[in-house]
C-alpha cells in the first residue's frame, strides 16, 4: 500500500515537473504570442499552477488504477487519449489551441505518460 502511494506521488511529481518545464520554458512565449494573435491576454496565475498540480496527480492516480486492469501499453494509450487528446479537442473547440504546438507537444505528452506509467508499474 505504502509503495503504491509513493509511486503515485512520484508519478504525480514527474507529470507536474514535465508540464511545468514544457509550458513555462519551452512553450510560454509561443502561448503568449498565440493568445495575443487571437486578442486574448495570456496570464500565468497561481490558481493555474495549482490546477495543473491537481490535474497531474489525478492523471497519476488514473494511471495507477488503469494499471490494475490493463497492460502497460493499454494504460499508456488510454491515459494519453483521455488526458491529452481530449484536452486538445476541448481547447481546439474553444478556439485557443495553436495547432503548430502539437508537432512537439504530441511526442512529449506520450513520453510524459509513458514515464509516469513505468514509474507506477515499477513501484518507484
Image (cartoon, rainbow, N blue to C red):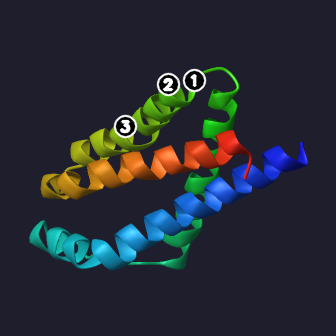
The label on residue 10 is none
Task: Say above or below: 116 vs 19.
Answer: above
User: Who is closer to the viewer here, 66 or 93?
Assistant: 66
Nearest-to-viewer mark from 2 and 3: 2
Q: Quadrant of residue 6?
A: bottom right
Q: Where's residue 119, x and y in %?
A: 63, 49
- Identity of the residue furthest to the front in this view: 122
Taking the image as shown, residue 17 lies to the left or right of residue 29, namely: right
Element type at marker 1?
Answer: loop
| Image coords of residue 1 (percent x, y) | 89, 42
Sequence order check: which comes first, mark 2 or mark 3? 2
Q: Is residue 59 in sight in this rendering?
A: no
Q: Are marks 1 and 2 in contact (CB under 8 Å)?
A: yes
* Outermost residue to the top: 69
Neighbour tally class for label 1: few under 14, some 14-19, many 20 plus, Cα within 10 Å: few
Q: In what element is the residue under mark 3?
A: helix
Q: Quadrant of residue 61?
A: top right
Q: Residue at x 18, y 53 (%)?
A: 103
97 relative position to 57: left or right? left
The front one of 46 and 13 is 13
Give the Cα separation between the discs numbered 2 and 3. 17 Å
- Foreground of the two, 26 or 114: 114
Q: Nearer the viewer, residue 108 or 122?
A: 122
Question: Disc 3 marks which residue?
Answer: 86
The residue that appears at 21% across and 52% down in the rendered structure is 102
Tell me if label 1 and label 3 are in contact, CB under 8 Å.
Answer: no
In this view, 68 is above or below 37 = above
Residue under circle 1?
Answer: 71
Q: CA distance from mark 1 to mark 2?
A: 5 Å
Name the residue that disc number 2 marks. 74
Amino acid at each position: 500500500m505504502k509503495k503504491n502511494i509513493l509511486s503515485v506521488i512520484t508519478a504525480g511529481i514527474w507529470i507536474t515537473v514535465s508540464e511545468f518545464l514544457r509550458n513555462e520554458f519551452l512553450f510560454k512565449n509561443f502561448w503568449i504570442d498565440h493568445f495575443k494573435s487571437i486578442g486574448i491576454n495570456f496570464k500565468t496565475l497561481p490558481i493555474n499552477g495549482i490546477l495543473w498540480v491537481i490535474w497531474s496527480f489525478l492523471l497519476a492516480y488514473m494511471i495507477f488504477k488503469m494499471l490494475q486492469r490493463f497492460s502497460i501499453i493499454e494504460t499508456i494509450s488510454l491515459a494519453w487519449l483521455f488526458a491529452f487528446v481530449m484536452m486538445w479537442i476541448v481547447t481546439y473547440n474553444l478556439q485557443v489551441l495553436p495547432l503548430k504546438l502539437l508537432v512537439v507537444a504530441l511526442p512529449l505528452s506520450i513520453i510524459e505518460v509513458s514515464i509516469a506509467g513505468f514509474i507506477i508499474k515499477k513501484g518507484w
